[in-house]
């Protein structure tokens, strides 16, 4: 420990410095024991992190939607061409044949739990 100054001006300066240090220490201890303020700070941090995650997911979803939209638009032509190439009478006959083949199995449970 330092020697106590004998000069009144030095003594006042030392007292002022000690008071400032003590005030800073009390503020630090008070902040650590203020549970309500610390909880609010943690909640605020969590809200900001969640907002950032939402923004990132929204951006990624927008990119996926755009990509799917591009694929759908490019696929329309090929689907349209495929549909116009279908032999409708042959397709109808295939549908009738499928019904005849499946009719005996109507109501029979399938492996997935549904019925045929």
Image (cartoon, helix red, strand yellow):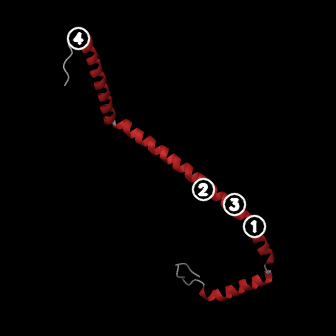
Q: Quadrant of residue 32?
A: top left
- Residue assigned mark 4: 7
- Residue assigned mark 3: 69
The percent position of residue 97, horizontal first and vertical second, equals 70, 87
- Residue assigned mark 1: 76
Q: CA distance from mark 4 to mark 1?
A: 95 Å
Label annotation for residue 98: none
Labels 4 and 1: the sequence-earlier one: 4
Depth check, front residue: 29 or 91: 29
Q: CA distance from mark 4 to mark 2?
A: 73 Å
The percent position of residue 48, horizontal first and vertical second, equals 49, 43
The secondary structure type at the circle numbered 1 is helix
Please report the residue visible at 34 percent of the width from the left and 37 percent of the height from the top: 35
The secondary structure type at the circle numbered 2 is helix
Q: Are marks 4 and 1 in contact (CB under 8 Å)?
A: no
40 relative to 66 in the view: left or right: left
Depth check, front residue: 92 or 60: 60
Depth check, front residue: 44 or 113: 44
The percent position of residue 52, horizontal first and vertical second, equals 52, 47
- Residue assigned mark 2: 61
The secondary structure type at the circle numbered 3 is helix
Labels 4 and 2: the sequence-earlier one: 4
Labels 1 and 3: the sequence-earlier one: 3
Q: Quadrant of residue 79?
A: bottom right
């Amino acid at each position: 420990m330092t020697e106590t100054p004998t000069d009144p001006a030095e003594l006042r300066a030392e007292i002022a410095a000690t008071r400032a240090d003590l005030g800073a220490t009390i503020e630090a201890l008070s902040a650590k024991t203020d549970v309500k303020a610390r909880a609010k700070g943690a909640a605020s941090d969590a809200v900001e992190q969640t907002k950032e995650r939402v923004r990132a997911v929204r951006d990624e979803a927008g990119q996926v939607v755009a990509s799917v939209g591009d694929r759908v638009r490019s696929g329309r032509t090929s689907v349209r061409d495929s549909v116009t190439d279908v032999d409708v009478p042959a397709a109808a006959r295939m549908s009738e044949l499928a019904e005849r083949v499946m009719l005996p199995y109507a109501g029979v449970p399938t492996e997935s739990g549904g019925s045929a």
